[in-house]
Amino acid sequence: MTAGKQATEARYRARVDQEWDRVTFGTHCVNCAPADCPIYVFVKDGKLVREEAAGVLETVEPGVPDMNPLICQKGLAWSLEHDAADRLRHPLRRAGERGEGRWERISWDEALTEIADVMLDAIDEIGPEAIVAEMSPQVATGPATSRFMGTVGGTVLDVDATINDFLTGLQQTFGKFSFSPSMDDTFHCDCILIWHSNPAHTMIPAFHFMTEARYRGAELVLISTDVSPSHSHVDYHVPVRHGTDAALALAMCQVVLSEGLLDRDFVAAQTDLSLLVRTDTGEFLRDRHVNRDGRDDRFFQAHPERGPVPADPASLELDFEPVLEGDLEVETVEAGRVTVEPLFARVKRMLDAEYTPEQASQICEAHPDTIRMLARKVAAGRTRISLGMSAAKYYHGDLMTRSAVLLLALTGNWGKKGAGIGSWNAFMFDGMSTLMAKTRAGVEAGMEVINAMRQAKAQLCEQDPSLTGELADRALLRLVGAGSMVPPAFFWYHQAGYRERWNRPEWNDPTMPREFDAYWKEAVESQAWGAAAENAATKPARVLLEVGGNTLRRSRGGKKAVFENLWPQLEKVICVDYRMSQTALHADIVLPATQHYEKTSFGIPATYTMFLSMTQPAVPPQGESRSEWKILGDLIQKIAERAEARGLESFPHRTGLPRRYDELWDLFSLGGKVADDVSAAAEMLADAVASGNMPEGTTLDTFREHGPVRYASWPFLALGTAVASPFPRGETLSPLRNHIEQGQPYPTLTRRAQFLIDHPWYREADEDLPRHKEAPAMGGDHPFRLSGGHSRWSVHAMNMTNPLLLETHRGKPFVLINDAVARAKGIEDDAPVRVWNDVGEFVVPALLSPAQRPDGLTVYNGFEGFMFPGGQGSNEVEPGMVKYLHLVGDYGHLSYAPTEWQPVPFDRCIHVDCEPHEGSA
Ligand code: SF4
């Protein structure tokens, strides 16, 4: 052990040995994974001493290990951020130019008056849409910000695009993405493919279920470009070339079919592979093709005796075995007799022609024998693909995901314990949903919201008997959720300088048949994106409100485009945060928020754990910091006060209805009843208890005294119920069981897990079926592929400056570079490297490692720009491209709903070059 490590350990042990006189339950209200860890927070003489895992979780399913100890090393160091050097304690106003770093301390009243006035100016000049907020993954900030923005009618950018944890390929295939298993379900796996993921670093509290499954006999396979830290815990490591995962998955599919490993019944019932497709156009055979007034969303299967028969839209249960191969002739309305075939036949032909293991090996560099071995393992038992969010961040990540899901489909691998794939689901808590929507305080008002949704759902099902509860829920999500958030792509295109970048053909898919703007124009004209597209073009932002967010750290594309285009048009940039973030450094006014052990808030309501945790004030707030509820409530009162002083009575809300300034506070606070973090938490919890989502009798004191509380039923919101399984009582959660066990249809156009997207753009792009495409040269023609990934030391940027965590690694950003390549280029370990491409450049110290591919560079996500030499972060070389095919918005399940289908920017596999930097690191 080095002297530095010994010192760190000694300091940590000294902390642990400290005495304490008070202990409270806490948690961390961010979207870490799995989140919600119940923590004991120790206090001595009113000061934070340390925290540790509470270890209070009971066994869920007999025979399955419990979740204790649920904690990670960030969680064990959070208390050090309470009074760290970058902690904000007082409202600040910039005293120099933006970003210059000169600040003056001002009073809360001064700060709120200045902000209220600029917001009134923006509303007056343009409309409330000119007040723009990026949401934050800090769940403690979400409800207050949503309520504030909903009350004033501002523009809320969809958080799933700004952070880009949206797996488009899941949405394309299943019509939903938020079906996530509980972490303990991993114990039931026979085979786990860790793909685009590094759970030993990024899922620290949950990782033991993988190793425990392995003790039970499961085999773990890591598929990655590098020898990642998860490597030493697996049975097989399959290194692949950057961006070629689809080829590997499709070759495994080819092996499954060629070796007779197909789960035929699963494929026939659950997927669109049993639907008939036309051989002349490549489309599904639709009702409208054979009947003059036929529907566009009704399809056909081939009956062995009766030929084409309508596929049941209401149920997946079959009383016959659909034919999966061979041709049929069908008389169509427009084209006469045409040949049709089951989609399965077409997919099989494609796999045999293009994706044999030998062919795929040329693409992905995995040996053909390895591909065959893996395919057999996947087909042999319950296989889970532990798909990381990196798959969401590749330009062709959708193709990779669709291909991986095809492998699971062919082997019958979802909807049962230990099988399947998942994403994230943070929608388990009814209270958060009701609080966004209700207009009065009290559980009666909360139940009115829920009952109105239930009634609307019943009406939809009555109008269309083919709808199941889940399908009706999702139709409602699109209706009711519209406007609460907007897909930010339109904002970025018009106001943040991305139009020019997205129209660079050399940074797009080279097979893209037309220029980007041609697709953009069609998408906007289709009206599929509603007011988001129009408002972004006509209503320039004047005020940017960041509440726990960090635009300048996280923006794909870095600061350049944003500074040149968005920042000059903003009258005020306002940051509400507990620490001085990269964005706060470039703001006009910074407001200090309370930290996680200073306020009452719930953790992320996720299916990973199936319980909810709460944090509470263990110590008083630092300085003048206030909870987000208090800050935004005070601000809304100040807006009303300043409006009155300026003789302003009302304004047109984004809904089109007039809104009076003197009613803002009542609307925001539900008549003064939700005025701070504690009353907000109590209001949310009461609604969730009334709806049955939380156990009867649960109060804030239950959390204060006993820690986390397990959910009692599914929430009412469609994003929560996307899991589509019986509520797990005394067992782990395995998603999608309702589709398998009850034959409930999927919320896709075809009501089946859908592998063919026969939209004209997809056919034109040759992406109507999953396939491999090379990653575009985002950033230009350069030899290295720059990728990122979650670091071990941070939840986003939040813990990057934590003094303890800084001591556990080099304490500064670094680029992982292959040691032999580095030496050949004259790059020494820890010496500065200049990384550049056609977009920009940054300087970063090198970390030489044989674990990196010769053509790979990795800079972990989360380091703030100001931590790099020169102040430029690794996102400065990302063009921030989106994929034009994600602009389709009017194709069945490819239509916008909050946190779902929309264009998202990519940051993996950026083309760059590097060289030794002549300066200091
Ligand atoms: Fe758990 Fe997240 Fe806290 Fe880590 S940071 S201990 S994963 S809640």
Image: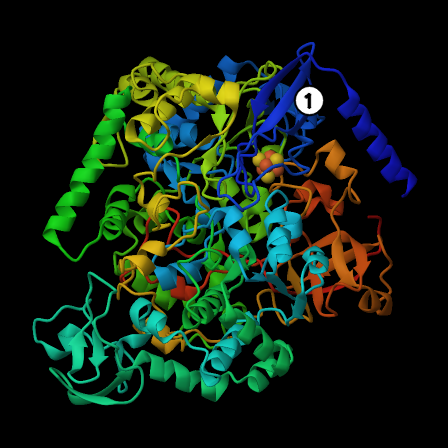
Task: Name the residue beneath numbered marker 1.
Answer: 83
Quadrant of residue 810 within the rendered picture:
top right
Q: Residue furthest top?
A: 45
Foreground of the two, 834 or 383: 383
Three-letter code for the amino acid on which mark 1 is drawn: Asp
Residue 100 locus on image (x, y percent) = 66, 33
Residue 354 locus on image (x, y percent) = 49, 85
Q: Residue furthest left?
A: 293
Residue at image point 39% right, 22% down: 698
Residue at image point 85% right, 30% down: 10
Foreground of the two, 64 or 690: 64
Left or right: residue 468 compared with residue 852: left
- Number of marks in the rendered image: 1
Residue 333 locus on image (x, y percent) = 11, 82
Residue 472 vs 544, above or below: the answer is below
Q: How many neighbours does mark 1 have within 10 angstroms: few (below 14), some (14-19), or many (20 or more)?
A: some
Left or right: residue 361 compared with residue 147: right
Left or right: residue 341 compared with residue 207: left
Residue 831 locus on image (x, y percent) = 85, 54
Quadrant of residue 902 within the rendered picture:
bottom left
Left or right: residue 751 compared with residue 904: left
Residue 35 vs 733, above or below: the answer is above
Residue at image point 34% right, 13% down: 645
Residue 85 can be seen in this image: yes
Residue at image point 38% right, 25% down: 685
